[in-house]
Image: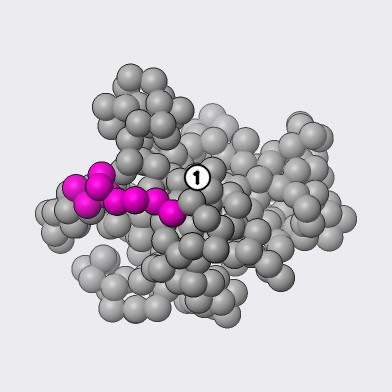
Amino acid sequence: MKIHYLVLGLLFSLSAQAADLVTRPSAVGHRDYRRAKEVLPILYAGMEQTFYCGCNYRDKKIDKQSCAYRVRKDPARAARQEWEHIVPAWAIGHQRQCWKQGGRKHCSKNDAFFRQAEGDLVNLVPAVGEINADRSNFRYSVWSDNPAPMYGQCQTIVDFKKRRIQPRKAIRGSVARIQMHMHTAYGLRMSAQDRHLFCTWARAYPVNQWEMERQHRLVKLQGSGNRFVTDPDAVNRFCA
């Protein structure tokens, strides 16, 4: 199974190098990250709630009262909605030559494969800027059934010492299915521990109405969405 996904990733990498990314907001197809941010408000129109905490937002301004959010450290970023990569840009690019030559900016400018993966709409969700910053490139994990709150009533927590994030239960299935999409589509490495975690989440937290609506919109904007949302057998094959 691991070899199968590695081959898929290699084939995708070869095709992505020659793929042309769309630039117009009205066009259908993959975009780079800058262009993706132009259409993400369309993707989430009418669903303007942050991923990790469920805070309402409008025009990039977080309504902290809507989710009883409490600022941990950074008031400016806590007030701002930002776009979060579920699979961090670091995980997508750090093993590529472009990253070794100049990090994320160099990859965004010079590597067609990275540009497509970085701008994949499946992988992008709205988040409170402070949590986006706190999460950094930490891995997902679970370590507490009754987490001590870090951001008011938000149930997502971060462990800075162990570099991990525990998302609220309502989004764990979505996190898992996005991870599955990104790792298979782009041939990224996934540890056995992460694979077990995401398979557990994908089965314990089934696809909900929000996830299905997001999937329909993804297809309209990008031409493709996340097959792990619409095809239960895809999850079973991934987790076999």
The residue that label 1 is drawn on is 33
Question: Which image quarter is the C terminus in?
Answer: bottom left
Q: Quadrant of the N terminus?
A: bottom left
Amino acid at pointer 1? Tyr
User: What is the span of residues highlighted in magenta in the rendered image?
Assistant: 14-22
Q: Quadrant of residue 75?
A: top right
- Number of other residues with Cα within 10 Å of mark 1, as a class: few under 14, some 14 to 19, many 20 or more: some
Residue occupying the point 29% across, 51% down? 19
Rendering coords of residue 2 (x, y %): 17, 55
Colour approach in the figure:
one colour
Q: In the rendered image, is residue 16 in sight? A: yes
| Rendered residue at 33%/19% (across/down) | 101
Residue 16 forms part of the magenta stretch? yes
Tell me what residue is drawn at x 48 percent, y 57 percent: 121
Q: Quadrant of residue 161?
A: top right
Instruction: Give the left or right position of residue 107, taking residue 4 as reference.
Output: right
Rendered location of residue 26, percent (x, y): 54, 63
Say which residue appears at 28% left-offset and 78% top-offset. 233
